[in-house]
Image (tube, grey):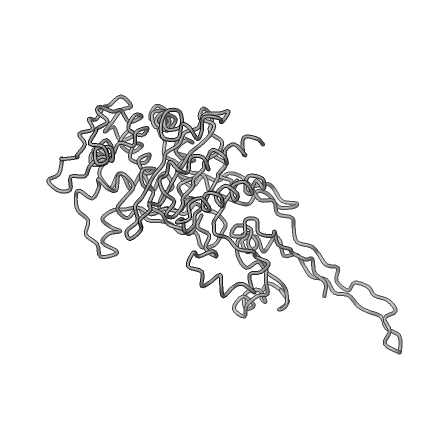
Amino acid sequence: MLEAQRVGSGTLAPHVLGRVGQMSPSEWETYREKGYAMDELVGKDGAEAAFESLLHGQPGRKVLERDPQGRVTGEKYAEVPVPGKDVTLTLDIDLQRRGEEVLSAYLEEHAQGAGGALVALDVRDGGVLAMVSQPGYDPSAFSADYEALAADQRHPLMNRAVQGLYAPGSTFKLVTAAAALEEGYLTPDTQILDTGRYTYYEDPQPQCWLYRQEGKTHGLETVSEAIADSCNIFFYDAGRRVGIETLDAYAHALGLGEKTGIELAGEKAGVVAGPDYSASIGEPWYVGSVLSAAIGQENNRFTPLQLAHMVSTFVSGGQRRQVHLFQKAEGEPPYETKVLGETDLSPENVAAVKEGMLAVTQEGSLAKAFQNLPVQVGAKTGSVQVAGEETSNAVLVCFAPYEDPEIALAIAVEQGGSGAELGQAAAEVLGAWLQE
């Protein structure tokens, strides 16, 4: 029996591209019904598994002619082998490689970092331009290294981009801003006074980070200024006005707590904090819990892919496009953009939030990192303290170009420090994309 060979991609994007291998007994039960031979290689995970039906092809058979002494005198095909179709993915190989280099370098510089993920999406159609999860592994040595990989507490086999769940921290303030603006609780010109401590409830009375660290306040702030300064008091008040039900509705509408539709198996849906989820895990929910939820705490947990998807959806005016790796297959029509949901966001409100994100990169915490890029970028960072860990998880989301967004990027690093520390990494990835 002859068959077209499927070879691996080395160590580039192992979690995305996946690997091939001998089918297991349980897989044989499925593939036998599809006409596979027992000894054929099949996609085990990643794109290799997702697009198995396209990549597989049909094996061929040769008939050998022999003389009376058993020597081969000729051969011919009884069945001509048919190779699988070439499948083109949305991944940009140069951007993928640069993303892996940048995230690896960041983890080397932050030795306490346990791992991280980076996702870049094409805002225009939801295509994945880069997807990095580290630590990674070499698919060609998977079988030999499996026991060590499976026992590694850094979980190198997990695709953190679609399976790692992280508190979004202050990046969630974009959702709170959108909900408050769209529901009419705020306008782009509404000012809220940062009092240092939020005293609406008798308990809790949380503080703004600036007041807690320096004993100062931000004063009166609009939504754009509050995003730029990441003012907790502003978003405590905005979240309280909106209420948890409406806040959760906007989170879902922007793609948080929802699967993105990517073809990879094992994608996590994430968690949007609220009374229903708290009840499901036996935890109490208090009326004042909305305050911490509004700044991305409580039980909010999302994948890096969802965070990139959220930004892409927002800058698209509320159109949530399905995320995809498939671009085209040989002899078939190319991928057509699919819309999973749509929330009609006011251009004025979108502009106000974007203005705050622009200020982060022009005069705020990321100004130095982004100063040399030839286009303007909008961004928001988050730093989330994890119970039992000395160092915060670092989160950053951004989009570019500012005037006409084409790429959305999210980075999350476990115990990676402050979100602002990710600025240089994000700028380097965007710089590589702009060079192309």
Q: Is residue 152 left or right of residue 325?
A: left
Q: Residue 170 location in percent, x, y?
A: 31, 37
Q: Residue drawn 57% across and 64% down?
A: 31
Q: Is residue 97 left or right of residue 211?
A: right
Q: Pick whichever, 428 or 434, lies toward us.
A: 428
Q: Residue 297 location in percent, x, y?
A: 27, 44
Above or below residue 408? Residue 40 is below
Above or below residue 127? Residue 20 is below
Q: Residue drawn 39% across and 33% down?
A: 314
Q: Residue 88 location in percent, x, y?
A: 61, 44
Q: Residue 351 location in percent, x, y?
A: 37, 24
Q: Is residue 429 left or right of residue 204?
A: right
Above or below residue 357? Residue 155 is below
Number of callouts: 0
The image quadrant that residue 201 belongs to is top left
Work out which quarter of the rendered image holds the C terminus and state it: top right
